[in-house]
Each structure stands twice: as structure tokens, then as C-alpha cells.
């Protein structure tokens, strides 16, 4: 098909022909990280001062900074991935993801759809007036407001396309993925500033903005209730951090042996969080797009999804019940009560996060070659077999099928539950952001350790690359 030829040749970053040395990977990861922080500080030219962030509550997941050319963040990339995974997972498009051709086709379509979604997200946002141009600047330039809005859309496209290319650079030449790196960078910045910022708060000028300094201030003022209120997000962040680290160490180990060498045995680990943090990223992006559509409709007076309050917060309908009650734990601990609306909101949000994460975890392993069949083929190619059974790929697949689907669903449910719970505590960087960041940094640590071993020991390098 002509479209297939086009997407396979879609502009992108060339894949390295051989192994990339660890120092080179570290260098490119550092360059992209610094570039991300620089781009996040470049403001959109011509933007009105009354611009409203539709994704304020999900900003940590989208890894973008509102008002900069990085406003859209990773939203278009993840939305494209969601659409393709749903189509492949439901067999709307019948692609065999174990085939390298179809994997390349998947990646090509994902890039093209990401570019399309940059416009799909940017154009309505600007057209609604919530991210529109300043009439004053348009008059000073001597141009129409329509021309200025077109210029803003171009800046959003430029930032979104640069994020797409930077993600490819990290994925092919760096450590981990660009999507994960950008999320971790944004959340870490928000956590550090949120805890240790000594400057006055915007809303309470006499109180430090940082939660730690704010708690100290309230204790000194004889207001322990407000001090505890300030500390709860820090506690929620720490608890989420510890639970994620613990979950990352949990695994099921399947005994394997080398068919050609008697007496040499090993174990193949299946992580409890088998699909990593990808399901929560996809679920967060899905909710972000729903919030954007609902808010745009509400601005136009169409309230089928709910209404928006004067401060931009959802106050009714699906917009309310598909957003987390950030003050739930605070109201329970400090006030000793929670309203029925908060309880219903918490149950709905928790259910959607858990079920959605389970579904995306399943789709993810099926579309990325992490299913029982693909893993069995990979183990057999390394000469591995289950001790006590004959050397047969079907036996490996049968044994793996007992564990991988169950662990995938349980791990997806766990990360969805933990992300929602952390949101209820008002964790700094938002609960989902903290969950993702800890998982991302843990995986980067493991990959760095693996890369260092491969540099030191050529035998380990050949074994890992053979897998």
C-alpha cells in the first residue's frame, strides 16, 4: 500500500548499526535532558495572559510546561500509541507484532499519528480562546488575531515535533526512552521545588511555598492542623516511592537450563510490574484527552460531560468523577470526614484507573513482543529449556502462559491502584507522576548497571544481545 511505504520512510532518527557504547548513550541522554529543560523555558510568543491550562491536573504525566513551546509535552505521542494499541489489540488491524516488518510499520504509523495529534490537540485549544493569541500583541504587530493564532499553532507543532525526535534519540542512542526521561525530569523538578521552595506562596504571601518550610512556619505559628495538612503530600510521596521500589523487586522466577550443557541452570524472572509503568502513562493520557474535550465543550456551554467551576476545576458530571479528589486523605486526617461526593469520586476514579491499567498492560505486552509466545521463541533461540521437559518451544510457551498473563493483569491493577491512591494524598508531582518517575528511574538504574557490565565483560554482552 502507498501509505505503508510512506510511513516506513517517515522522517526520523537513524537507528545505530552496531552497539552504542555506554559513554555515548550517557552523553546523548544528558544532551536531550538539558535540551528538554531549555525548551520548557521558551515561552510561546503572542500568548494571551488569560490562557487556561486544560491539562493542569495531568501536567506531570504529559511532561510539558504550560505556556512554553513544550505545552503539549508527550501527549500526542502517547495518544497515537493508545490508538494503535487498541486497533492492534482488538484486531481491527491484523498485524503480527512478532514480525519485524509489522513492528517497523507500527512505529512508522505511531510517528505519523503523533504528528497528526499535535494538530488535533493544538488547533481546538487555540481556537477555543483558552490558548489563543493576545489581541494587544496582534495590534502591535499589525496582523489579525487569526494570523497570530496560526503562529501559536506553529510554535506548538514545532515543540511537539521536537519532543517526537528527542524521544527517538533517547530510545535509539540513549538510556531508556525519551517519554520516560521527560516525565521523570518534570516530576523531579516539581517535587524538589514543592518541598524545598522557601519563597512566599502566590496565594498566601506570608507562607513559604515549599511544603517543608510551610509546615515549619505553621508549627511555629501554633497551627498544627495546617502543618499536618502541609506534610501529608510529602508523606504520600515517600510512601508511594517505597511501595513502587518494593513492587519493582517482586518477581516470579522460572527455572531454566542450558540444553547443550548439563548442570548449568538459571532462572528467568517475570517482574510483578511486567508491563512497567506504560499502562499508567497510557491511562493518564487517555484521561487527559477526555478532560480536554470535556472542558472545551463546557466552555461552549455544552455540559454533557459536566460543568467547570470559576477556578477551572470540574464540579459535576464525568469530568468530576474521572478526576481524583486530591484532598481526600487530607480531609480524612485533618478534618475527620469526607463528603459523599468525594467518596463516589474516589471510587469511580480508582475503578477507571485500575481497569484501564489492566487493559493497557495486556495490550502492551501483546504489541511489544513480551507475550508468552515471543518470550518462548527468544529463550529457545538461546538454547534454554525447562528442566525435566524436552526441548520444545511449545512447552516453554505453555509454562510461560501460566504466569505472564496473570502477572501482567495483577501488575497493571497494582500500578493503577497505587497511582490513584497517591493522587488522593495530593502527592507532590501528582500520584501518577511519582509512580511513573520511581519506576522510570529504577529501570534506568538497572539499564545503566547492565550497560556497564556489557562494557566490562564481552561474554555478558554477547549473551544479552543474543536475547
Image (cartoon, helix red, strand yellow):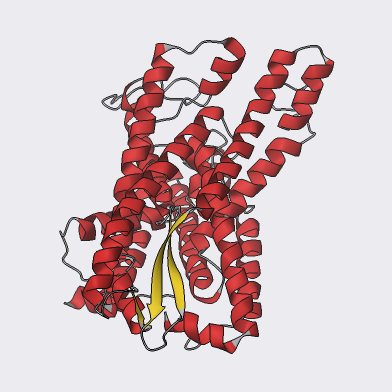
Q: Nearer the viewer, residue 126 or 161?
A: 161
| Relative image position of residue 78 (x, y in whole percent) | 39, 55
| Relative image position of residue 132 (x, y in whole percent) | 46, 41
**323 is higher (above) or lower (below) than 123:** above
| Relative image position of residue 421 (x, y in whole percent) | 48, 32
On the rendered image, what quadrant is the C terminus found in? bottom left
| Relative image position of residue 275 (x, y in whole percent) | 40, 56
At horizontal 46% and vertical 54% (from top left) the residue drawn is: 74
Q: Nearer the viewer, residue 266 or 3?
A: 266
At horizontal 70% and vertical 17% (from top left) the residue drawn is: 226
On the rendered image, what quadrant is the N terminus found in? bottom left
**Relative to 104, 464 lies left or right:** right
Quadrant of the image occupied by residue 306: top left
**268 is higher (above) or lower (below) than 90:** below
At horizontal 55% and vertical 88% (from top left) the residue drawn is: 459
**27 is higher (above) or lower (below) than 366:** below
Amino acid at each position: 500500500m502507498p501509505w505503508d511505504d510512506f510511513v516506513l520512510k517517515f522522517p526520523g532518527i537513524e537507528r545505530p548499526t552496531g552497539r552504542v557504547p555506554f559513554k555515548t548513550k550517557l552523553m546523548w541522554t544528558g544532551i536531550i535532558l538539558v535540551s528538554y529543560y531549555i525548551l520548557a523555558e521558551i515561552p510561546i510568543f503572542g500568548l494571551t495572559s488569560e490562557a487556561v491550562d486544560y491539562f493542569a491536573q495531568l501536567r506531570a504525566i504529559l511532561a510539558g510546561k504550560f505556556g512554553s513551546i513544550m505545552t503539549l509535552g508527550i501527549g500526542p505521542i502517547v495518544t497515537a500509541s493508545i490508538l494503535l494499541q487498541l486497533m492492534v489489540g482488538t484486531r481491527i488491524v491484523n498485524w503480527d507484532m512478532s514480525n519485524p516488518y509489522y513492528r517497523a510499520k507500527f512505529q512508522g504509523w505511531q510517528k505519523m499519528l503523533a504528528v497528526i495529534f499535535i494538530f488535533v490537540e493544538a488547533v481546538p485549544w487555540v481556537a477555543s480562546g483558552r490558548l489563543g493569541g493576545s489581541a494587544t500583541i496582534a495590534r502591535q504587530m499589525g496582523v489579525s488575531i487569526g494570523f497570530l493564532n496560526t503562529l501559536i499553532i506553529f510554535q506548538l507543532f514545532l515543540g511537539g515535533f521536537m519532543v517526537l525526535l528527542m524521544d527517538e534519540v533517547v530510545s535509539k542512542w540513549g538510556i531508556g526512552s525519551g517519554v520516560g526521561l521527560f516525565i521523570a525530569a518534570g516530576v523531579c523538578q516539581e517535587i524538589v521545588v514543592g518541598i524545598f521552595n522557601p519563597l512566599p506562596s502566590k496565594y498566601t504571601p506570608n507562607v513559604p511555598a515549599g511544603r517543608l518550610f510551610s509546615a515549619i512556619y505553621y508549627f511555629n505559628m501554633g497551627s498544627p492542623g495546617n502543618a499536618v495538612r502541609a506534610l501529608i503530600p510529602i508523606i504520600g510521596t515517600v510512601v508511594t516511592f517505597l511501595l513502587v521500589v518494593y513492587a519493582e523487586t517482586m518477581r516470579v522466577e522460572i527455572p531454566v537450563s542450558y540444553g547443550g550443557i548439563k548442570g548449568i541452570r538459571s532462572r528467568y524472572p517475570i517482574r510483578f510490574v511486567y508491563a512497567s509503568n506504560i499502562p499508567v502513562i497510557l491511562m493518564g493520557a487517555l484521561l487527559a484527552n477526555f478532560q480536554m474535550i470535556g472542558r472545551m465543550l463546557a466552555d461552549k456551554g455544552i455540559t454533557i460531560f459536566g460543568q467547570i467551576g470559576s477556578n477551572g476545576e470540574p464540579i459535576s458530571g464525568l469530568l468530576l468523577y474521572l478526576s481524583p479528589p486530591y484532598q481526600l486523605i487530607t480531609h480524612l486526617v485533618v478534618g475527620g470526614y469526607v463528603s459523599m461526593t468525594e467518596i463516589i469520586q474516589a471510587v469511580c476514579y480508582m475503578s477507571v484507573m485500575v481497569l484501564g491499567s489492566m487493559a493497557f498492560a495486556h495490550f502492551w505486552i501483546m504489541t511489544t513482543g513480551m507475550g508468552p509466545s515471543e518470550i518462548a521463541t527468544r529463550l529457545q533461540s538461546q538454547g534454554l529449556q525447562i528442566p525435566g521437559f524436552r526441548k520444545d518451544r511449545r512447552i516453554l510457551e505453555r509454562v510461560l502462559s501460566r504466569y505472564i498473563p496473570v502477572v501482567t493483569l495483577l501488575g497493571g491493577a497494582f500500578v493503577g491502584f497505587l497511582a490513584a491512591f497517591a493522587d488522593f494524598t495530593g502527592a507532590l508531582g501528582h500520584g501518577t507522576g511519582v509512580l511513573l518517575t520511581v519506576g522510570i528511574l529504577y529501570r534506568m538504574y538497572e539499564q545503566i548497571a547492565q550497560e556497564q557490565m556489557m562494557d566490562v565483560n564481552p561474554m555478558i554482552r554477547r549473551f544479552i544481545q543474543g536475547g
